[in-house]
Amino acid sequence: MMAGNLFVVDLTYIADLSKIDALLEPHRAFLKSGYDRGVFLASGPKEPRTGGVIIARANTRAELEKLIEQDPFKQEGVAEYRITEFNLVMKADGLSF
């Protein structure tokens, strides 16, 4: 159906929102680079704002983990990351990656 494995990256903030906000612009630049590379498919903040979620596609978990190491949130230690790999069985009509 598609090349690459699918992952949910669940970020949880472990620092004050003022520190998160200070890194938001470089974090979004990191996200854009992931979209440009075809790795990130969707992303956004949680509600309430306790972290964020990234839907990603990568050949391996290790490849995705290597990319996440470049996230300013990760580099500055302001978020924890939980990665869950899943197998796409069904999707909405019109949803393409």
Image: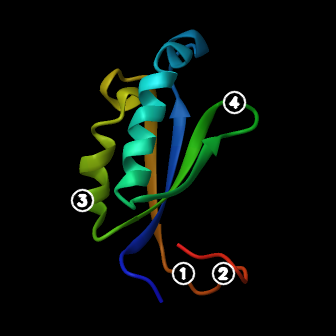
Between disc 4 and disc 2, whose residue precedes? 4
Relative to residue 97, is residue 22 depicted above or below?
A: above
- The residue at 24%/49% (across/down) is 66
Which amino acid does the dot numbered 4 rest on? Arg
Quarter occupied by residue 40:
bottom left
Between disc 2 and disc 3, whose residue precedes? 3
Which amino acid does the dot numbered 1 rest on? Leu
Crowd rating for badge 3 (residues with CA inside 10 Å; few <14, some 14–19, many 20+): few
Residue 3: x and y in percent read 37, 80
Gap between marks 4 and 3 measured at Cα: 28 Å
Gap between marks 4 and 1 measured at Cα: 27 Å
What residue does disc 4 label?
Answer: 49
Secondary element under disc 4, as helix, strand or loop, is loop
Q: Count up the numbered dots.
A: 4
Residue projecting furthest to the top:
18
Tell which tag, 4 or 2, sits nearer the viewer.
2
What residue does disc 3 label?
Answer: 62
Gap between marks 2 and 3 measured at Cα: 25 Å
Q: In the image shown, does 29 or 48 lie closer to the viewer?
A: 29
Crowd rating for badge 1 (residues with CA inside 10 Å; few <14, some 14–19, many 20+): few
What residue does disc 1 label?
Answer: 88
What residue does disc 2 label?
Answer: 91
Gap between marks 2 and 1 measured at Cα: 7 Å
Residue 62: x and y in percent read 24, 59
Check residue 20 in the rendering and tell me which mark sits there, or answer none.
none
Secondary element under disc 2, as helix, strand or loop, is loop
Between disc 3 and disc 1, whose residue precedes? 3
Report the colour scheme.
Answer: rainbow
Residue 69: x and y in percent read 28, 39
Relative to residue 94, is residue 43 depicted above or below?
A: above
Q: Are marks 2 and 1 in contact (CB under 8 Å)?
A: yes
